[in-house]
Image (cartoon, rainbow, N blue to C red):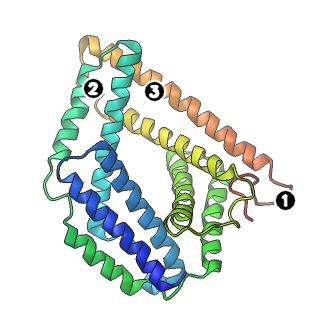
Amino acid sequence: MQKYIIDHITRVYYIKLAALAFQLTDGYNKKTTHQFRTDTKKLRAFYRLISLEAGQAKKLKLPGKLHKMYHHAGTIRDLQVQIKNVEDYFKKTGIKLHTLQAMLERRLKHLSEKKGQILPGEYFADQEKKAQLKSPPQLHAETLQQFFRQKKEAIRVIIAKARFNPTDLHNIRKNIKDILYVTGIYTEDIGSSLPMLFRKNNEMKEMEDLADELGRYNDTGSILSFLKRNRRAFKDREKQSTLFYYNKLEQEQKDRWNKLVARFTSMTATSSPGSHHLEGPLNDQ
Protein backbone atom coordinates (compact mmCIF):
# COMPACT_ATOMS: atom_id res chain seq x y z
CA MET A 1 0.00 0.00 0.00
CA GLN A 2 1.48 3.33 -1.09
CA LYS A 3 1.40 6.53 0.98
CA TYR A 4 -1.28 8.17 -1.16
CA ILE A 5 -3.64 5.27 -0.33
CA ILE A 6 -2.76 5.47 3.38
CA ASP A 7 -3.49 9.21 3.37
CA HIS A 8 -6.67 8.64 1.37
CA ILE A 9 -8.01 6.23 4.01
CA THR A 10 -7.16 8.69 6.79
CA ARG A 11 -8.89 11.48 4.87
CA VAL A 12 -12.01 9.39 4.25
CA TYR A 13 -12.45 8.59 7.93
CA TYR A 14 -11.86 12.14 9.12
CA ILE A 15 -14.43 13.37 6.56
CA LYS A 16 -16.89 10.73 7.83
CA LEU A 17 -16.27 11.72 11.45
CA ALA A 18 -16.67 15.44 10.67
CA ALA A 19 -20.02 14.77 8.97
CA LEU A 20 -21.25 12.59 11.84
CA ALA A 21 -20.13 15.14 14.43
CA PHE A 22 -22.11 17.81 12.57
CA GLN A 23 -25.19 15.57 12.66
CA LEU A 24 -24.74 15.09 16.39
CA THR A 25 -25.13 18.83 16.97
CA ASP A 26 -28.86 18.25 16.40
CA GLY A 27 -28.93 15.55 19.09
CA TYR A 28 -27.42 12.16 19.83
CA ASN A 29 -29.44 10.09 17.40
CA LYS A 30 -28.90 6.39 18.20
CA LYS A 31 -27.76 5.43 14.71
CA THR A 32 -25.44 8.42 14.30
CA THR A 33 -23.93 7.99 17.77
CA HIS A 34 -23.20 4.32 17.07
CA GLN A 35 -21.72 5.09 13.64
CA PHE A 36 -19.48 7.83 15.06
CA ARG A 37 -18.05 5.39 17.57
CA THR A 38 -17.64 2.64 14.97
CA ASP A 39 -15.81 4.89 12.50
CA THR A 40 -13.58 6.20 15.30
CA LYS A 41 -12.66 2.63 16.22
CA LYS A 42 -11.92 1.83 12.57
CA LEU A 43 -9.58 4.83 12.35
CA ARG A 44 -7.92 3.77 15.62
CA ALA A 45 -7.39 0.23 14.31
CA PHE A 46 -5.87 1.63 11.10
CA TYR A 47 -3.56 3.84 13.18
CA ARG A 48 -2.41 0.77 15.09
CA LEU A 49 -1.63 -0.96 11.81
CA ILE A 50 0.35 1.84 10.19
CA SER A 51 2.18 2.54 13.46
CA LEU A 52 3.81 -0.87 13.08
CA GLU A 53 5.24 0.34 9.78
CA ALA A 54 6.06 3.87 10.95
CA GLY A 55 7.84 2.75 14.13
CA GLN A 56 7.72 4.11 17.67
CA ALA A 57 9.05 7.56 16.71
CA LYS A 58 6.03 8.25 14.49
CA LYS A 59 3.44 6.15 16.29
CA LEU A 60 -0.09 7.30 15.49
CA LYS A 61 -2.93 7.32 18.01
CA LEU A 62 -6.29 9.00 18.39
CA PRO A 63 -5.87 12.69 19.27
CA GLY A 64 -6.94 13.58 22.80
CA LYS A 65 -10.04 15.64 22.00
CA LEU A 66 -11.34 13.02 19.58
CA HIS A 67 -10.81 10.30 22.19
CA LYS A 68 -12.73 12.42 24.72
CA MET A 69 -15.66 12.87 22.33
CA TYR A 70 -15.56 9.15 21.51
CA HIS A 71 -15.72 8.29 25.22
CA HIS A 72 -18.59 10.74 25.79
CA ALA A 73 -20.53 9.27 22.86
CA GLY A 74 -19.85 5.80 24.30
CA THR A 75 -21.42 6.71 27.64
CA ILE A 76 -24.47 8.03 25.80
CA ARG A 77 -24.65 4.92 23.64
CA ASP A 78 -24.55 2.70 26.76
CA LEU A 79 -27.48 4.62 28.25
CA GLN A 80 -29.43 4.33 25.00
CA VAL A 81 -28.90 0.56 25.01
CA GLN A 82 -29.93 0.27 28.66
CA ILE A 83 -33.12 2.30 28.10
CA LYS A 84 -34.06 0.15 25.12
CA ASN A 85 -33.50 -3.02 27.16
CA VAL A 86 -35.77 -1.72 29.93
CA GLU A 87 -38.43 -0.86 27.34
CA ASP A 88 -38.11 -4.32 25.75
CA TYR A 89 -38.44 -5.90 29.20
CA PHE A 90 -41.72 -4.02 29.74
CA LYS A 91 -43.05 -5.14 26.34
CA LYS A 92 -42.17 -8.74 27.14
CA THR A 93 -43.33 -8.93 30.76
CA GLY A 94 -45.72 -6.01 31.29
CA ILE A 95 -43.56 -4.87 34.23
CA LYS A 96 -42.75 -1.14 34.08
CA LEU A 97 -39.54 -0.11 35.84
CA HIS A 98 -40.48 3.56 36.26
CA THR A 99 -37.67 4.64 38.59
CA LEU A 100 -34.90 2.90 36.67
CA GLN A 101 -36.07 4.24 33.31
CA ALA A 102 -36.46 7.76 34.70
CA MET A 103 -32.93 7.63 36.16
CA LEU A 104 -31.44 6.47 32.86
CA GLU A 105 -33.36 9.07 30.85
CA ARG A 106 -32.33 11.91 33.19
CA ARG A 107 -28.70 10.85 32.92
CA LEU A 108 -28.98 10.62 29.13
CA LYS A 109 -30.58 14.07 28.90
CA HIS A 110 -27.86 15.60 31.07
CA LEU A 111 -25.02 14.13 29.01
CA SER A 112 -26.70 14.89 25.68
CA GLU A 113 -27.02 18.56 26.61
CA LYS A 114 -23.45 18.89 27.83
CA LYS A 115 -21.76 21.68 25.93
CA GLY A 116 -18.35 21.55 24.28
CA GLN A 117 -18.25 17.79 23.64
CA ILE A 118 -18.89 17.89 19.89
CA LEU A 119 -15.86 18.90 17.84
CA PRO A 120 -16.10 21.33 14.88
CA GLY A 121 -15.31 20.35 11.28
CA GLU A 122 -12.02 22.28 11.29
CA TYR A 123 -10.70 20.04 14.06
CA PHE A 124 -11.03 16.91 11.92
CA ALA A 125 -9.38 18.64 8.94
CA ASP A 126 -6.42 19.70 11.13
CA GLN A 127 -6.00 16.19 12.54
CA GLU A 128 -6.02 14.71 9.05
CA LYS A 129 -3.09 16.95 8.07
CA LYS A 130 -1.16 16.05 11.23
CA ALA A 131 -1.73 12.34 10.63
CA GLN A 132 -0.44 12.56 7.08
CA LEU A 133 2.83 14.06 8.34
CA LYS A 134 3.37 10.92 10.42
CA SER A 135 2.11 8.34 7.95
CA PRO A 136 4.79 6.00 6.50
CA PRO A 137 5.82 6.13 2.81
CA GLN A 138 4.23 2.71 2.30
CA LEU A 139 2.66 -0.20 4.13
CA HIS A 140 4.20 -3.58 3.37
CA ALA A 141 2.19 -6.81 3.18
CA GLU A 142 4.52 -8.25 5.87
CA THR A 143 3.42 -5.48 8.25
CA LEU A 144 -0.22 -6.36 7.70
CA GLN A 145 0.50 -10.02 8.44
CA GLN A 146 2.47 -9.00 11.54
CA PHE A 147 -0.51 -6.94 12.72
CA PHE A 148 -2.86 -9.92 12.48
CA ARG A 149 -0.33 -12.23 14.13
CA GLN A 150 0.03 -9.84 17.07
CA LYS A 151 -3.73 -9.55 17.52
CA LYS A 152 -4.25 -13.30 17.37
CA GLU A 153 -1.38 -13.94 19.75
CA ALA A 154 -2.78 -11.41 22.23
CA ILE A 155 -6.08 -13.31 22.17
CA ARG A 156 -4.33 -16.65 22.65
CA VAL A 157 -2.40 -15.38 25.65
CA ILE A 158 -5.60 -14.22 27.36
CA ILE A 159 -7.38 -17.50 26.61
CA ALA A 160 -4.40 -19.53 27.86
CA LYS A 161 -4.60 -17.78 31.25
CA ALA A 162 -8.23 -18.96 31.49
CA ARG A 163 -9.31 -16.23 33.95
CA PHE A 164 -11.96 -14.64 31.72
CA ASN A 165 -12.76 -11.66 33.92
CA PRO A 166 -14.57 -8.68 32.33
CA THR A 167 -11.27 -6.99 31.45
CA ASP A 168 -9.98 -10.15 29.73
CA LEU A 169 -13.19 -10.53 27.73
CA HIS A 170 -13.11 -6.86 26.76
CA ASN A 171 -9.52 -7.21 25.54
CA ILE A 172 -10.39 -10.31 23.50
CA ARG A 173 -13.20 -8.38 21.83
CA LYS A 174 -10.99 -5.36 21.22
CA ASN A 175 -8.37 -7.47 19.41
CA ILE A 176 -11.01 -9.28 17.36
CA LYS A 177 -12.55 -5.94 16.40
CA ASP A 178 -9.16 -4.60 15.28
CA ILE A 179 -8.85 -7.60 12.95
CA LEU A 180 -12.37 -7.09 11.59
CA TYR A 181 -12.00 -3.32 11.17
CA VAL A 182 -8.69 -3.53 9.32
CA THR A 183 -10.06 -6.34 7.15
CA GLY A 184 -13.05 -4.13 6.33
CA ILE A 185 -10.81 -1.20 5.40
CA TYR A 186 -8.96 -3.39 2.92
CA THR A 187 -11.91 -5.27 1.46
CA GLU A 188 -14.57 -2.53 1.53
CA ASP A 189 -12.77 0.83 1.48
CA ILE A 190 -10.03 0.02 -1.02
CA GLY A 191 -11.44 -3.15 -2.60
CA SER A 192 -8.47 -5.40 -1.87
CA SER A 193 -8.82 -9.11 -1.15
CA LEU A 194 -6.96 -10.68 1.75
CA PRO A 195 -6.80 -14.41 0.99
CA MET A 196 -4.12 -15.00 3.62
CA LEU A 197 -6.53 -14.26 6.47
CA PHE A 198 -9.12 -16.99 6.56
CA ARG A 199 -9.03 -20.62 5.49
CA LYS A 200 -12.81 -20.98 5.37
CA ASN A 201 -15.53 -18.62 4.25
CA ASN A 202 -17.36 -18.89 7.58
CA GLU A 203 -14.38 -17.91 9.75
CA MET A 204 -15.06 -14.18 9.38
CA LYS A 205 -18.68 -14.79 10.41
CA GLU A 206 -17.51 -16.78 13.44
CA MET A 207 -15.31 -13.89 14.54
CA GLU A 208 -18.15 -11.41 14.07
CA ASP A 209 -20.52 -13.62 16.10
CA LEU A 210 -17.97 -13.92 18.90
CA ALA A 211 -17.41 -10.14 18.97
CA ASP A 212 -21.19 -9.56 19.11
CA GLU A 213 -21.61 -12.01 21.99
CA LEU A 214 -18.78 -10.32 23.88
CA GLY A 215 -20.46 -6.98 23.19
CA ARG A 216 -23.73 -8.20 24.71
CA TYR A 217 -21.80 -9.43 27.75
CA ASN A 218 -20.28 -5.97 28.14
CA ASP A 219 -23.66 -4.21 27.75
CA THR A 220 -25.28 -6.40 30.41
CA GLY A 221 -22.34 -5.78 32.72
CA SER A 222 -22.88 -2.02 32.35
CA ILE A 223 -26.52 -2.11 33.49
CA LEU A 224 -25.71 -4.49 36.35
CA SER A 225 -23.03 -2.07 37.57
CA PHE A 226 -25.46 0.84 37.27
CA LEU A 227 -28.07 -1.00 39.32
CA LYS A 228 -25.52 -1.87 42.00
CA ARG A 229 -24.34 1.73 42.30
CA ASN A 230 -27.89 3.08 42.54
CA ARG A 231 -29.60 0.32 44.54
CA ARG A 232 -30.67 2.72 47.33
CA ALA A 233 -32.71 4.79 44.87
CA PHE A 234 -35.37 2.08 44.48
CA LYS A 235 -38.13 2.18 47.07
CA ASP A 236 -41.21 0.19 48.08
CA ARG A 237 -42.98 -1.83 45.37
CA GLU A 238 -40.49 -0.96 42.63
CA LYS A 239 -37.58 -2.13 44.74
CA GLN A 240 -38.81 -5.73 44.42
CA SER A 241 -39.49 -5.55 40.68
CA THR A 242 -36.09 -3.94 40.04
CA LEU A 243 -34.39 -6.62 42.12
CA PHE A 244 -36.16 -9.26 40.02
CA TYR A 245 -34.91 -7.54 36.86
CA TYR A 246 -31.39 -7.44 38.31
CA ASN A 247 -31.47 -11.15 39.18
CA LYS A 248 -32.74 -11.96 35.66
CA LEU A 249 -29.88 -10.00 34.07
CA GLU A 250 -27.34 -11.54 36.43
CA GLN A 251 -28.45 -15.05 35.48
CA GLU A 252 -28.30 -14.16 31.78
CA GLN A 253 -24.79 -12.82 32.35
CA LYS A 254 -23.71 -16.03 34.08
CA ASP A 255 -25.16 -18.15 31.26
CA ARG A 256 -23.44 -15.99 28.65
CA TRP A 257 -20.13 -16.20 30.54
CA ASN A 258 -20.39 -20.00 30.75
CA LYS A 259 -21.03 -20.25 27.00
CA LEU A 260 -18.09 -17.97 26.22
CA VAL A 261 -15.76 -19.94 28.48
CA ALA A 262 -16.94 -23.21 26.91
CA ARG A 263 -16.28 -21.75 23.49
CA PHE A 264 -12.78 -20.63 24.40
CA THR A 265 -12.05 -23.95 26.13
CA SER A 266 -13.15 -25.80 23.00
CA MET A 267 -10.82 -23.66 20.90
CA THR A 268 -7.95 -24.55 23.21
CA ALA A 269 -8.81 -28.25 23.23
CA THR A 270 -8.70 -28.50 19.43
CA SER A 271 -5.14 -27.22 19.22
CA SER A 272 -2.51 -29.85 18.54
CA PRO A 273 -0.49 -31.31 21.47
CA GLY A 274 2.31 -29.00 22.48
CA SER A 275 1.12 -26.27 20.12
CA HIS A 276 0.32 -22.71 21.13
CA HIS A 277 -1.96 -22.20 18.13
CA LEU A 278 -5.72 -22.42 18.24
CA GLU A 279 -7.84 -23.93 15.52
CA GLY A 280 -10.75 -22.05 14.02
CA PRO A 281 -11.12 -18.37 13.14
CA LEU A 282 -8.15 -17.26 15.24
CA ASN A 283 -5.71 -19.73 13.72
CA ASP A 284 -2.67 -18.28 11.91
CA GLN A 285 -2.33 -18.91 8.23
**Within 10 angstroms of label 2, few (less than 14), some, or many (20 or more) residues?**
many
Q: Earlier in the sequence, mark 3 or mark 2?
A: 2
Q: Position of residue 9 (x, y in %)?
A: 43, 73
Q: Where is residue 190 shown, x and y percent of the image?
A: 51, 70
Query: Does 67 appear above or below 223?
Result: below
Per the image, the residue denoted by label 2 is: 100
Q: Quadrant of the N terminus?
A: bottom right
Q: CA distance from mark 1 to mark 2?
A: 51 Å
Mark 1 or mark 2: whose residue is earlier in sequence: 2
Q: Amino acid at mark 2?
A: Leu
* Mark 2 element type: helix
Q: Are marks 3 and 2 in contact (CB under 8 Å)?
A: no
Per the model, the C-alpha gap separating discs 3 and 2 is: 14 Å
Spatial CA span between label 1 and label 3: 39 Å
The structure residue drawn at horizontal position 43% and vertical position 39%, both measured from the top left corner, is 219
Q: Is residue 60 among what the camera can see?
A: no
Lower position in the chain sequence, tag 1 or tag 3? 3
Residue receiving disc 3: 249
In what element is the residue under mark 1? loop
Against 157, residue 162 (above or below) is above
In the image, what residue type sits under mark 3?
Answer: Leu
User: Is residue 22 left or right of 210 when viewed as pictured?
Assistant: left
Q: Is residue 227 above or below residue 165?
A: above
Q: Nearer the viewer, residue 199 or 219?
A: 199
Residue 274 is labelled as: 1
The residue most toward the bottom is 137
Q: Is residue 139 visible?
A: yes
Residue pictured at 31% horizontal, 49% vertical: 33
Q: Is residue 243 above or below residue 110?
A: above
Disc nearest the viewer among 1 and 3: 3
Where is residue 281 shown, x and y percent of the image? Answer: 69, 53
| Quarter of the figure with residue 135 | bottom left
